[in-house]
Image: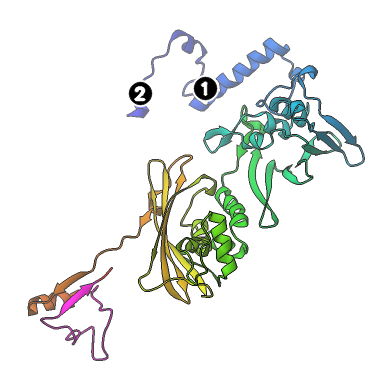
Amino acid sequence: DVGRVCILQGPVAVRYSTKANEPVKDILDGIYHGQIAKLLERLHGGEQDRISSVEYLGGGLALSDRSLAEPAEAELPATEIHVLAVPKDLSEVPEDHSWFETLAGRERSWLRALLTSRVVMQGSRLVDNVVRQALRPQPGQVARVKSRSDGQPLKVEIIDMAGQREAMLAIDGKGLIKFFLFTTARRRQCALEIQLMYSPQTGAYPIHEVIDGHVERIKRFYAQLWFEDTSLAESAIGSAALVHRGPETIPSQADVDAFRAAIGAARGAKCADVPLDYSIKVFWPALCACLMSATCDGDLSRLVHVSNAFSRVKGQGIRIGARLGSEACVTEAVDGPTGRLVGVCGYVLADGVPAVEVRTKFLFRRAGKASSSASQFRVVDEPDTELHIGDRTMLARILSKSWFVPAETTSRDTPSGHGYKHIHVGSTLLFRL
């Protein structure tokens, strides 16, 4: 009985036990506040006004003037924007820590905490700070730091040597930091968004990565890279559908020649048949839509391709000028020792008829705890099973089962009463899952 445990106190504990039936909370609070009072008396003479305050406890300390980088700096007082430039000469590019110290400024702030923290909290784990990895100084790079009138930074933009925006950092009034990395694909600028929370009250690790919505933000970035029309990807993100279809296309001889050149294949003689490898180009939108769906609940930045398999459907093929489409479905999502294995199977359709079967597998490398087993599944092709009805007893047993509903019936069949008239002794039933 826990409520009847007798605790034998020592002489020190007895000395300070001055109250009967004192709650445990009051005892622990007394110890906590007592320690604070002792430190206050020893370090500050008991005067709270002498206690200094800081923005946060974690992060690195400011370096001395001698160790700071010496980038060119210009200040625009009207807009309160500080411009820091990295030298174009590779030999003059500052060390990473010097650049981050200069960029972060001397005052403790969210920007200093972010740029001087080598690790950040990701849930209950400590992971490398990806912002530091992405913002390492490059020749000719320019940083524009926008600050409030009191010197607190609000926004940082990184511009490359060619004048293109590489990255951006900004914080809102609630401590939410949004970090954007930019790249150019499909003749447009694509942005990867990472969200972090500045929590100065959390001690040594004031920067926390926002986990909620992280997978969806990664998927939206890859949607910009993989899809010409991102509406197909947007509809797939969060969708629980298993089957996804891609847009139709009609390949020309120029399209096929360009594909052959891209994969390093010999052009060869002109032929109306399209090479089998071209199937992945047609199948790609439907395949990516599967990876975007809620069924594949994984971080696409940790995706590893495992295998591809192509096979022509007997009597079919894809030819130049045919109307090609695709459909794909997720056939498995199973957790393993190294991550989640996802299988996708589907067809390239030629004029609406399956022409090429495509099977592919991917691995989402695990970065933490395994997913719930409730979201795991595998579609298995079961062999057909035949059952011969040899006597009236077997016939009666089959017809009495509530789950027995033939796929094909006639107008004379009635599922009650005397059963299905076209099923009788001597019939052979085919069961197919």
Image quadrant where residue 65 sits: top right
The three-letter code of the residue at mark 2 reads Val
Report if residue 23 is visible in the image. Answer: no
- The residue that appears at 61% across and 55% down in the rendered structure is 225
Question: Under tag 1, what secondary structure?
Answer: helix
Name which of mark 2 and mark 1 comes first in the sequence: 2
| Residue located beneath label 1 in the image | 27
SS at mark 2 in the image: loop
Give me the residue at 58% from left, 21% from top.
Answer: 32
Task: Identify which amino acid the numbered label 1 is placed on.
Answer: Ile
Residue 37 lies left or right of residue 283; in this view the side is right
Image location (x, y in percent) of residue 313: 37, 69
Residue at 55%, 65% (x, y): give it. Answer: 256
Queried whether the magenta region covers residue 414, the answer comes back as: yes
Q: Is residue 53 above or below residue 328?
A: above
Q: Which residue lies most toward the right here?
A: 78
Whether residue 164 is situated above or below residue 433 in the rendered picture: above
Q: What is the quadrant of residue 41 in the picture?
A: top right
In the image: residue 36, left or right of residue 324 = right
Work out which quarter of the rendered image holds the N terminus and state it: top left
In magenta stretch: residue 384: no
Local crowd size for mark 2, using a 10 Å CA cut-off: few (<14), some (14–19), many (≥20): few
Q: Which residues are magenta?
A: 403-431
Q: Which mark is residue 166?
A: none
Q: Quadrant of residue 247?
A: bottom right
Give me the disc on residue 5: 2
Q: Which x, y percent locates residue 153? A: 78, 37
* 238 relative to 250, above or below: above
